[in-house]
Image: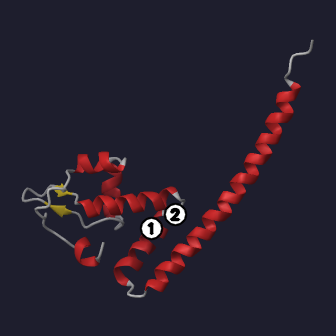
Amino acid sequence: MDAADRSRTTAPSDPADRSPADAAAATGLSLDTLRYYEREGLIGPIARDAGGRRRYSADDVAWIGIVTCLRDAGLGIEDLRRFTRLLTQSADPTDRVTFLRERRAELEERQRATRRALEVLDDKIAYYGAREQPRR
C-alpha cells in the first residue's frame, strides 16, 4: 500500500470497506487493538464515513495482517513504528530490506534457541517418564 492510499481521510465507495467490528473479525484483533495500532501510527489513517465512523478498506485489512504477522514474529511496537516509517518516508528500498533481514536473523536465532530448549525438555520428559514406569 503506498503513502497516497494510507493518507485517505474520506471513505471510498469500495464495497470491500468494513466496519470496525468487521475489520476486527477479519483480522482476529480486538477493536481496542485496532484503535491502539492506529494511535501508534502502525495502521491508517483509517478512512471515515460521513458520520465520522471508521471504514477499513481491503488494503487496510491486508496491512493489518502484515502488522499482525510481524508482531507474531516478535517485533515490538517500536520496530513496527520504524518499519512503517521506512515504508512511508524512505524512498530507498534497501533500508526496508536491511531492516527485514535483521529482524529475520533475530527470529532465526530465537527459533534455534527454542529448538534447543525443546530438546532439553524432551530429554527430561524421557528421563522422568522412564522413572515413573510402575514396577512389577
Residue 112 numbered mark, or none: none
- For image coordinates 34% across by 68% down, the residue present is 41
Question: Tags 2 and 1 in contact by the CB under 8 Å rule?
Answer: yes
Mark 2 — residue?
75
Splitting the image into 4 quarters, where does residue 57 fall? Answer: bottom left
Q: Amino acid at mark 1?
A: Leu
Tell whether 103 sits left or right of 77.
right
Q: Residue 6 at what x, y percent from top left?
A: 26, 71
Looking at the picture, does residue 16 appear above or below residue 30?
below
Which residue lies most toward the right here? 136
Q: Quadrant of the rendered structure where residue 17 is?
A: bottom left
Q: Amino acid at mark 2?
A: Leu
Label 2: element kind? loop
Q: Which quarter shows the N terminus? A: bottom left
Tell me where residue 61 sits by quadrant.
bottom left
Residue at 11% across, 59% down: 49
Quadrant of the image containing the C terminus: top right
The location of residue 5, given as percent across then percent down, is 23, 73
Residue at which label 1 appears = 80
Q: CA distance from mark 2 to mark 1?
A: 7 Å
Instruction: Determine the residue located farthest toward the bottom in the rendered image.
Output: 92
Most extreme residue toward the left, as rendered? Answer: 50
